[in-house]
Amino acid sequence: MAHPANLLIELHTEELPPKALKTLSEAFAAGIEQGLRSLQFLAPDSRVTVFGSPRRLGVHITHVAARSADQPFKQKLMPLAVAQDKAKNWTAAFLKKLESLGRGHLAKLAIGTHEGPDALLVENDGKAESVFLKSVAAGQPLITELQAALDETIAKLPIPKIMSYQLADGTTVQFVRPAHRLVALHGHQPLPVQALGLIGGTKTFGHRFLSQGEIAVHSADTYAEQLEREGRVIASFEARRARIAELVTAAAAKLGAQAVMPAALLDEVTALVEWPVVYESGFEAEFLAVPQECLILTMQQNQKYFALMDANGKLLNRFLLVSHLQTDDPSAIVAGNARVVRARLADAKFFYDQDRKATLESRIPGLASVVYHNKLGSQLERVERVTGIAVEIAKALGVDETHVERAARLAKADLRTLMVGEFPELQGIMGRYYAQHDGEAPDVANAIEEHYRPRFADDALPASRVGTCVALADKLETLVGLFGVGEKPTGDKDPFALRRHAIGVLRMLMEKRLDIALDRLLAIAEGSFSVAKAYAAATGEVASFIYDRLRGLLREQGYSANEVEAVVSLAPTRIDVVPAQLAAVRAFMKLPEAESLTAANKRIGNILKKAGAVPASFDPSLLFEPAEKALAAAFEQVRPIAEQRFAQGDYAGMLKSLAPLKLPVDAFFDDVMVNVEDARIRDNRLALLAALRATMNRVADLSLLAAG
């Protein structure tokens, strides 16, 4: 690739949708990169910098060739029998083919000879002898292929909502927002590519208010620096995001506070400003009587402010705002934002005050008018099912049934409050506050919030036993109910977050060491539906779904695919002991006898698979070969020890107790023929092997750990 230089492409637009900016900018850069890389314009070490701001999408790529390399190719023309007649002369069809390729001059070439880069060859294509053209495709100039990459990238951008607008000549263009300038530079060289009715050049614009207007970009490499210096624009989304985080953190520290800075808010604010400046403002202390979650959410969602907390995690009546206007006197900006937030917080206070005029319990009947799912009824019907499941779980785990029933019955009542109607994200959180106001027991109030946990990956689990029972019930009812009406996740679509619900169930069972079987939990959930039989098939599907999630969860925890499958393939009902079983498998595989025993286990499995039906037990009196008698004797010694340790939950000890079987198992396969003609002898030996394998595989399917 000749004359590599760095490439810059920028589309300057009107304000882009902030929630889509990060995705759009990354897709724009990735599309250009992939298009050029696939055509071999990029070096292996080419680096890509993504630019994305409220009014621009761009990309900078290093080491881009001015022209792609020549590419040798071989093209099949037609079967030899069609290309030549009996006298070995080219047929009219073949000559016409050469002409269509602009290679008519090759008609005089003998097979296997060259004219420049071109040659005609005869090779077998797998079916018959065929004539091939071997040649070299000339490399293409960057502008040609960049144009194609740009066209394809723009066509495939994940635009949430397309706008139509007209150019000065009346042409209608469709894009996410009207585009006004296109910058395209290869090093210092402008590239006249075209997009959205624009022609690539060197001119762009800086900040709408802080720059001096048009900026002439000198080269691809000076773009970012010029925009920052002359245009007051930090073009890189990531650099601007880091700058905002730095400014917010520093401003909070000056106040002896910590900023509440969720990633989603930081991303959205980054997409709203090109030159971030942070100012401090505040609101009246009287609003702090409203639950701080409400105030924080109001500031974040409505105004994009960063709330401030003291060292004890208590909300302050101060906040930080990110502006795109840098000024020596920000008093008007500060006062204006304080005025706006005051109105928002007044709404939140009104909702809170009004909601507390009615108890949560009084709101339960109103859930009858809240549709949960058109095939599963109302939220009130769902509450009845969840309550029934939660009480049964409480009985099984020895948790206070009265408090569990009360928490489950009140768990969804806050859906009928004004605050949750305005901020659905506060479900459960407001229920806890209102339950406390109503004088409910502390564990009941806390369980109302906790039953939604975990809300996302790595979220905390319910802290209380009451909350755990209600959370399990809520998730199990969701899984069985929605699977029962056919609402199963497909591919990457999971509108009801069923994967998250399944992982929540697994995490609670494992991390809280809950001594209750998964099949029992699913049976309890199934029984809560009025036509339980209709959900029996769904329960089996839910179990398979949960085991698939278990596989993924355990792999994320660092276990190998074979280790996980060895345990999960047995469909363990006690999820709480799975980590101990996996630890036991790892310890077993370090034993010197492990390799031989896993291989033998796999061999036994194959024999039994081919044998079909096998007797339930073996008869020691039918054993006569020394090796089979020795194996039976060793097994009879090992089995009670192994079963006892398994029953005690000593899974590592159970697997270790199998070690004495190595020698007799090896001797058995060396000296004993299993599939003999005598059916009684054959079936008895198969029964011995079946009993042996059943004991060996109490913790895990050892055959899946065998090498090869």
Image (spheres, rainbow, N blue to C red):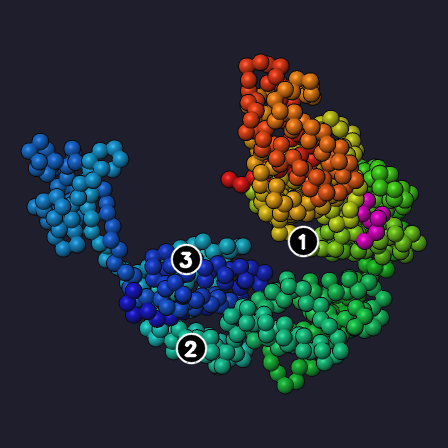
| Residue that label 3 marks | 34
Residue denoted by label 1: 457
Q: Residue at x 45, y 59 (%)?
A: 30
For residue 482, say whether it is visible: no
Q: Which residue reaches farthest bottom?
A: 328
Q: Which residue is mark 2?
A: 222
Q: Residue at x 20, y 43 (%)?
A: 132
Circle nearer the N terminus (3, 2):
3
> Dots 1 and 2: beta carbons under 8 Å?
no
Residue 241: x and y in percent read 58, 70
Which callout, 1 or 3, points at the residue further toward the start of the chain?
3
Determine whether 283 is above or below 366 in the image. Answer: below
Mark 3 residue type:
Gln
Q: Are marks 3 and 2 in contact (CB under 8 Å)?
A: no
The magenta stretch is: 463-473
Q: How many marks?
A: 3
Task: Using the image, determine if residue 211 lies above or below residue 304.
Answer: below
Amino acid type assigned to the residue bearing label 2 in the image: Thr
Which image quarter holds the N terminus?
bottom left
Q: Position of residue 146 (x, y in %)?
A: 35, 61
Tell me the quarter of the picture where residue 382 sits: top right
Which marked residue is nearer to the observer: mark 1 or mark 2? 1
Q: Secondary structure at mark 2?
A: loop
Query: Would residue 147 appear left or right of 256 to someone viewing this image?
Result: left
Q: CA distance from mark 3 to mark 2?
A: 23 Å
Check residue 118 for magenta coloring: no
Residue at 51% across, 70% down: 236
Q: Using the numbered discs, state the Cα–Cα distance from disc 1 to disc 3 in whole angstroms.
A: 31 Å
- Measuring from the top left, give residue 559's x and y in whole percent: 62, 49
Q: Which mark is residue 416?
A: none
Residue at point 76%, 52% (across, down)? 461
